[in-house]
Image: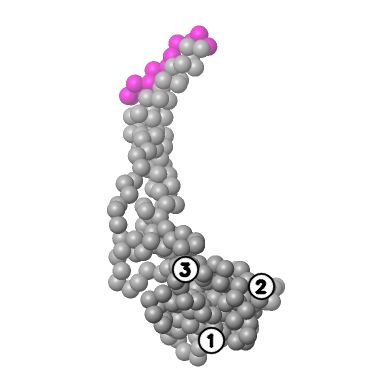
Amino acid sequence: MATLAKPQMPILREMPDQIYQRIANRMKAHAEERGETPPATEEGEIFYDLLYPLAEEISEQQQLLEYAFLQGFLPWADGEFLQAHGYLLGLDQKEGEDEEAYRNRLIERARTEEGNGRRSDYEQWARQIAGVGGAVAIEKERHDLSVDVYITGQDGEPVTEAFAQQVREKLEGKRVALHDLQVFPALPFVVKVVVKISVQAGADQAAIIQLIRTRVQDYLKGRTSIMYQQIGALILVDGVTDYSGYTLNGSTGNLTKPANAVATLELVVHT
């Protein structure tokens, strides 16, 4: 994949001398407008001693601002900022995968346009149908042009074969030519989180538990690898001072969701 060069932003790359000179020029112009003698601004003068350190600080802040600005764009993001782009696009960095390879995968995902018949299209189209809560599409399960879509109901519950066929009929109008499209009831993959939490005095326990539920449900969407430690971090919401006895499907290991299943959360919180 071709590398996109970082943009040149000279206004954000000024040296302290350049910044100080602009300040000095402005001071001179203001004095002349008032008919006064411009102050001495050369090195060693009081204004130089006062304002040159400020110019140095502005120069450093410009560099930081440029860095922060570029982190908002996937081609130049790195570190935690690149991970944030991955979270938005629903792709985690693989173990041992370097940043450049990870970035290329994210860019490829971001370039995928709706309507070209990719797996994500069928998932999105299915979720737009009334009564469908979750959808997972799998390509090439029967032959090169097949797309199988596995769906759950609005609240993640199993659907009937009859409803799956109704969804298939509604998707026919969007089906890309030559694709063999089938729709099946998804197998719910239950993710059971059990944990005991300690909460601050006077905290709204019901609201805290609901917030934990929402955070974990958001994390589970579209994931195949479900990480024990990452869910643990989601438990520490405002109002929770500590937690213990945390298990994920009865253990302290990671989970792998089958491709034809949709994760559903069973949350048990003890206080």
Secondary element type, mark 1: strand
Q: Residues within 10 Å of mark 2 (few under 14, many from 20)?
A: few
The residue segment tinted magenta is 34-49
Q: Is residue 75 magenta?
A: no
Determine the secondary structure under disc 3. Answer: loop
Q: Which of marks 3 and 2 is nearer the N terminus?
A: 2
Instruction: Identify the mark at residue 187; answer none if there is no mark.
Output: 1
Secondary structure mostly taken by the magenta-highlighted segment of the chain: loop
Residue at the image point whose x is 45% and y is 11% from the top = 37
Q: Which of marks 1 and 3 is nearer the N terminus?
A: 3
| Residue at which label 2 appears | 130
Residue 38, by quadrant, is: top left
Q: Residue at x 46, y 73 (%)?
A: 179
Seen from the viewer's position, the closer of residues 231 and 137 is: 137
Q: Does the magenta-highlighted stretch encompass residue 41?
A: yes
Q: Residue furthest front?
A: 178
Q: Is mark 2 on a helix, strand or loop?
A: loop
Q: Quadrant of the C terminus?
A: bottom right
Residue that label 3 marks:
177
239 or 227: which is nearer to us? 227
Residue 47 percent location from the top left of the image: 41, 24
Name the amino acid type tagged 3: Ala
CA gap, disc 3 to disc 2? 24 Å
Going by the numbered disc 1, the residue's amino acid type is: Leu
* Above or below for 168 versus 12: below
